[in-house]
Amino acid sequence: MNDSNASPEELLRRFQARIDAEQRIEPKDWMPEAYRRTLVRQISQHAHSEVIGMQPEGNWILRAPSLRRKAVLLAKVQDEGGHGLYLYSATETLGVSREELVEALHEGRAKYASIFNYPTLTWADIGAIGWLVDGAAIVNQISLQRTSYGPYARGMVRICKEESFHQRQGYEVILTLARGSAEQKAMAQDALDRWWWPSLMMFGPHDAESAHSAQSMTWKIKRQSNDELRQKFVDQTVPQAEFAGLVIPDPQLLWNAERGHYDFGPIDWEEFNRVVAGNGMCNRDRIAHHRRAHEEGEWVREAVRAHEERKRERAAQDAA
Amino acid sequence: MVPGQHMPLFEVFIRSRRGLDHKHVGSLHAETHQQALEYARDCYTRRSEGVSIWVVRSGDIVASQEEDAGEFFDPMDDKPYRHATHYRLPPEVDNM
Ligand SMILES: [Fe+2]
Ligand SMILES: [Fe+2]
């Protein structure tokens, strides 16, 4: 069973057999180069999304309407930074460095969830993000807890434990507004109107048009298709909107008793492609801000290095 | 090596099953990393407790002290809003 003298066909056979048997692939296992590349692309894209996603919410930390809301939002945004870290570390087990990953993001070679290219115009948007965007992310992440790559799967388990609070605090914000004054209710509705369709787009293209899906399903990197996950999200979210007395902006949305699911209207893929291609409202800002934050942090890294250097010198002097 | 002096200490981590994290199980003395791996195999996996072993020199582990836990973890205690249960939702939508 030694990998080193097996033929490539034999290695591939063992690899797929392991996946078919629902076992995880671990960093030091043999894996096809395309599997590794797909994982690097997908996990780093996921990591970038966590980190870039801090920006639209960070925009409201100082303007949150109460001390409690500020503290909650701050804690949530801090969690997202942590999620980015878990996922970057999982990517690093595949032999890529953090520097390479961040460079790919800055140069536009790596993508992140395009929903974060929409602006947060009102406080209600913070509620809508927690409720819908985290809600959609959770549906996807629960499914990925069973992804075939061990470090990714374990990262997802850790992340899912933290996500539930994100969605609940968002829904609480929305529910509070929806039960407030007419003006506040209108804010909540307006936020739902703007965030609903981009949230559905988070699950990616329809299965028939999804470029990487079939291979990723065979490798069990993906466990459920984009359309299955999207349907799940719609089914669980519609009753939550109804409960809050809000209307989902889709005239074709209708319970289909035969299917046991909600039917919903067509997604505007032209808009999706425009935003993915870099022409959303905030694409340039998001990357510029990320670059600036990294550059402006240079003095901190420099100070840390200088401080350690001085400590070492002093220790050497004391020893002499 | 001074007679009677022990070999360096290593900490042993074992992954009991594919897909799980490595977990600390104990420590042992060995001269090299390779030797530590073999000793760990003989010592900690005699009943197929593991599919993978990590060994790390004990001296390379930096640990916080439990006596300092109060101060060290202090910032975590006063943030109940980090927990999902902090948000009371009506029963109709409480399944999120
Ligand atoms: Fe997250
Ligand atoms: Fe989140």
Image (tube, coloured by chain):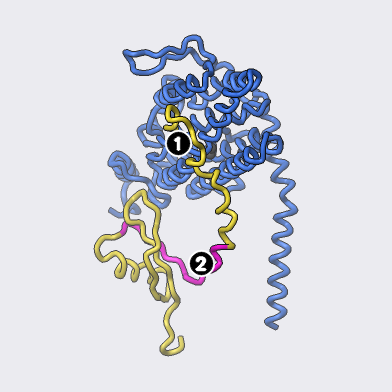
Chain colours: A blue, B yellow
Location of residue A154 with respect to A224 vertically, above or below: below
Task: Look at the numbered disc 1 and give the secondary structure of its residue.
Answer: helix
Q: Position of residue A317 (x, y in %)?
A: 72, 79
Circle 1 marks a residue in which chain? Answer: A
Residue beneath the point at 71% across and 67% down:
A309
Q: Which residues are magenta?
A: B50-70
> The C terminus of chain B lies in which quarter of the figure?
top left
Q: Position of residue A36 (x, y in %)?
A: 45, 42
Instruction: Identify which residue, A222 or A168, lies in the foreground.
Output: A168
Figure label count: 2
Task: Look at the numbered disc 2 and give the secondary structure of its residue.
Answer: helix
Q: Is residue A83 left or right of residue A285?
A: left
Q: Look at mark 2 in the image and give the residue it sits on.
A: B66
Q: Is residue A235 left or right of residue A316?
A: left
Residue B66 counted in the magenta span: yes
Amino acid bearing label 1:
Gln
Q: Position of residue B45 (x, y in %)?
A: 29, 64
Q: Position of residue A168 (x, y in %)?
A: 51, 34
Q: Quadrant of residue A177?
A: top right
- CB of mark 1 near ligand 1 (< 8 Å): yes
Q: CA distance from mark 1 to mark 2?
A: 34 Å
Q: Which mark is on residue A80?
A: none
Amino acid bearing label 2:
Glu
Residue A39 counted in the magenta span: no
Location of residue A189 with respect to A309 vertically, above or below: above
Q: Look at mark 1 in the image and give the residue it sits on.
A: A141
Circle 2 marks a residue in which chain? Answer: B
Q: In this view of the protein, can residue A103 be seen by the observer?
A: no
**Mark in front: 1 vs 2:** 2
Residue beneath the point at 39% across and 70% down:
B27
